[in-house]
Image (spheres, rainbow, N blue to C red):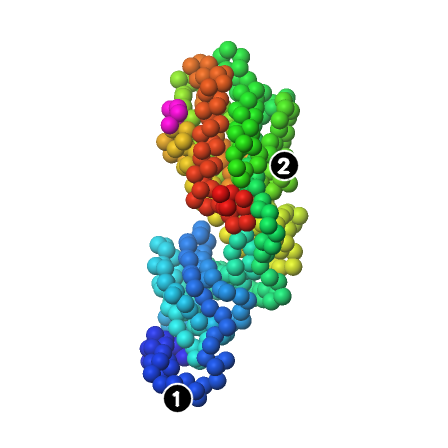
Amino acid sequence: MFDNSSSPWDRRKFLGAVLGTSSAVFGLVAPEKVLAARFIDAVQTSRQPDYTRYVFNVNGPLDYKTFSLDNPPRVVVDLTGTEAQHLEIPSVPAGSVVNGLRVGIQDGTNLRLVFDLKAAVKPRLVLLPPGGGMGYRLVVDLPHDKAVTLVAKETADPESKPKIQTGRTFRELVVAIDPGHGGKDPGAMGHRGTKEKHIVLDIGRRLRDMVAAAPGLRPVMTRDSDRFIHLRGRTAIARNAKADLFISVHSDAFRVTSARGASVFCLSQHGATSEAARWMANRENEADFVGGASISDHDQDVASVLLDLSQTKTLENSLDFAHRVLGQIGDVTDLHSKRVQQAGFVVLKSPDIPSILVESAFISNPEEEARLRTVKYQNEIARSILDGINTYYAARAPEGTHYAML
Ligand SMILES: [Zn+2]
């Protein structure tokens, strides 16, 4: 046990020394007792608003049990028949309830994780099945307060296999282009009477043609005419088209005509959190996210962890994408803000589609209104967005896509 004098590392070293120095000793031990079927090769940690999260990458479904110890408070997780491979323990995030994580061997073949805590808390454990390009993951959430949370054990179906690309065909990356406003909603209006809905449709169409001509990419328009679509209708169109990216194009107004320059927006963390609550409230959404992986067979805990992981990753990707587009736009026009802005725009709320909103210029600024009407400027904005898409995917084209084979 951990409570006695020998530390797990000593134990492990001892085991390694015995096995490494004498084949005779090795022969005394049945191989299946020594060779672990499962291994953990990566761990990540992050501080969320209510808890500290550890995510362990596992090479398959595994059995585990967890219990708590006092003086000092610890949470112990034993993983049956599991070992650690090249595991680097990350440092504890600031403001966490966790003091540290220790990893060692327990009973020869089990891996023991010990979370040293500042206060006794009930952990939440979930084993996530493969999805979203990831394999099995064991998620350990340690709440910051003493609120009692459910200890859930979810054994993934051992029969389920990760999706493997079998065909010779590779899919195109789908880029959803969303010209803002339309129909009865003209959007902002310039001094010369230019309507935002027309300008952004023009830019959207130019971007569509560029995306269509780019290898590995396929455009989808939320609207390709002067018609009105609800905000949720726009994200639904992207979702139905299985969009990989979502770009909303605007050219808004400000009460001060001197306001100028382009900007790029992402969803705010607050917007993401409130959206998570909304999604969890709507069971119809459950089967719909994380690469379409159905989670109807799993409990609410798995659903909420999956949604949470998906949202965090999506927001990270949205920010990266937004930075790249902002950098490109900064080469062709003045920026209203040199930083990516974040706000609770409804059209950016898809939990699994990296989404940005581009304010191409201020239509309320007479000078910019004139520029927005030119083919040159419309093409420059569209080209900047396309260049942003290309640098984004050059860094991370998903496997199985045509783009990754370019
Ligand atoms: Zn607008």
Where, by quadrant of the figure, is residue 104 drawn?
Answer: bottom left
Rendered position, 297 above or below 250: below
Q: Which residue is mark 1?
A: 24
Amino acid type of disc 2? Ile
Callout 2 crowding tier (Cα within 10 Å): few <14, some 14–19, many ≥20: some
Percent across and percent down for residue 64 are 51, 71
Percent across and percent down for residue 329 are 41, 29
Q: As rendered, which of 201 and 184 lies closer to the eye?
A: 201
Callout 1 crowding tier (Cα within 10 Å): few <14, some 14–19, many ≥20: few
Q: As rendered, which of 10 and 16 lies closer to the eye?
A: 16
Write the residue at 42% across / 26% down.
Answer: 262
Q: Any magenta on residue 332?
A: yes
Q: As rendered, which of 8 and 325 lies closer to the eye?
A: 325
Rendered position, 271 above or below 78: above
Write the residue at 60% across / 38% down.
Answer: 238
Q: As rendered, which of 146 and 251 lies closer to the eye?
A: 251
Percent across and percent down for residue 183 are 63, 22
Of the image marks 1 and 2, the number of the one nearer the N terminus = 1
Which quarter shows the N terminus? bottom left
Query: In the shown orientation, is residue 5 left or right of residue 232?
Result: left
Query: In the shown orientation, is residue 376 left or right of residue 227?
Result: left
Query: In the shown orientation, is residue 22 left or right of residue 353?
Result: left
Q: Considering the numbered disc 2 on the image, is that residue within a helix, a strand or a loop? A: helix
Q: Residue furthest top?
A: 192
Which residues are the magenta region? 331-335
Q: CA distance from mark 1 to mark 2?
A: 66 Å
Percent across and percent down for residue 372 are 48, 18
Q: Which residue is mark 2?
A: 237
Amino acid type of disc 1? Ala
Q: Any magenta on residue 2?
A: no
What secondary structure is the magenta-colored segment mainly? loop
Which mark's residue is nearer the viewer, 1 or 2? Answer: 1
